[in-house]
Amino acid sequence: MFLKALKFYRFKGEPNGWSLEGRPKGNEYNQWLTLTGINLVVGKNASGKSKTITVIRQIADLISGDKKLSDLRYGTSEYQMEFDDNGKKIEYYLSFKDFKVVQETLIVDGSEKLNREQSKLFYEKANDFLSFKTDSGIIALTRRDSEQQPFFESLYQWGKNLNQYNFGSQLGQNMFLRDINAIKVDEETSLKDTNKVAEVFVKGQNRFPDTFLNLIISDMARIAYKIKNITTISIKFISVFGLAVDESDLSDVTDQTEMSQGMFRALSLLIQLNYSILSKSPSCILIDDIGEGLDYERAKNLIDLIIEKVKDTNIQVIMTTNDRFIMNKIPLEFWSVIQRLPGKALFYNYQNSKETFDEFKYSGLSNFDFFETQFFITGFEKEE
């Protein structure tokens, strides 16, 4: 299941309002931001790249019950979403004001299953709508009953299994294990906490002893980090355990406190990504500032690797960057380019601007020029 289309509004109609939308049609706004399996969101600083990631993460946390409306920073927003669930169309709408639900609807393949405004919820065993009431600060999708409302389950799993990696952050480099033996391999691991990379590594070794470690070593080699082994060791002076790598050209191991930020970020991401794929758990992976801290060749190779690893899976990837070198290396077919207007972030991609994207192939210019000159908006005709 993946997120196919999205519209988002914060403080809609108010002076401080802000929205995520697709490319306008003429003078008509309020269009869908369309997404595919692999997406690279590009834009200038402060254009809305990280906000886009945050908006998607926020609704995932609400749907899964990991957060309540009262936990949010802003209490007035509206979501319109379309999902593709193995060919089944799921439409979900949620609006809330001052941290209280105003409306919530769910439609599956054209059949309404939930209408919060009318207090209607479909019950499978009764084969009918029954009246229901839920606290105004709680969304109805968190009322999970797999027998009566099985149509909630795919959305719940999407929200629960969505992972977000802020590549410019520590990604667990400053987090350690007190006791390796205390880790319960059979317990479910929440991959939403990306600081627990050492714990994920230990569980991956135990759950997938024949593949996990070799995959990570092979993946690190693809981005020019030649490693013979990865393990957990006692970190000097602080009586905790952390990750360590045995690099081919060094005589001693390097623990996570001594690794460069770029190397550790790549290692952390690949440990968690491989664990996700092997455990068949992820639905959507969000990566903000992909490649931050890596030289551009390594960053490009990392993105190529991610695309290759998820291309034939049911995992959706949404990455962001404003690095010109990365943009020049990644095909435009994966791009969603942000045009920032007052109170709006408008997205142009191959789905809503196919003619313009195709035209650019014959320009002889670099991918970065497509972005920098705003060709994605004007195309050849208006440029002339």
Image (cartoon, rainbow, N blue to C red):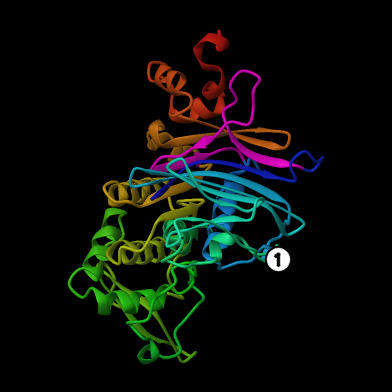
Q: Indicate the position of residue 77 as horizontal and vertical percent values.
A: 69, 49
Question: Is 94 or 200 nearer to us in this picture?
Answer: 94
Q: Which residue is mark 1?
A: 70
User: In what element is the residue under mark 1?
Assistant: helix
In the shown orientation, is residue 175 left or right of residue 18? left
- On screen, residue 307 above or below 261: above
In the shown orientation, is residue 332 left or right of residue 204? right
Q: Residue at x 41, y 40 (%)?
A: 36
- On screen, residue 357 above or below 384: below
The answer to whether residue 255 is visible is: no
**What is the quadrant of residue 158 in the picture?**
bottom left
Q: Residue at x 42, y 34 (%)?
A: 328
The magenta segment is 17-44
In the shown orientation, is residue 344 left or right of residue 304? right
Q: Indicate the position of residue 39 as horizontal and vertical percent values.
A: 43, 42
Question: Is 336 or 383 nearer to us in this picture?
Answer: 336
**What is the quadrant of residue 138 in the picture?**
bottom right
Q: Residue at x 40, y 77 (%)?
A: 198
Q: Indicate the position of residue 370 as horizontal and vertical percent values.
A: 49, 25
Question: Is 277 or 246 nearer to us in this picture?
Answer: 277
In the shown orientation, is residue 316 left or right of residue 70? left
Q: Residue at x 25, y 69 (%)?
A: 212
Residue 28 colored magenta?
Answer: yes
Kind of residue at badge 1: Ser
Q: Quadrant of the C terminus?
A: top right
Q: Indicate the position of residue 62 as horizontal and vertical percent values.
A: 58, 61
The answer to whether residue 382 is visible is: yes
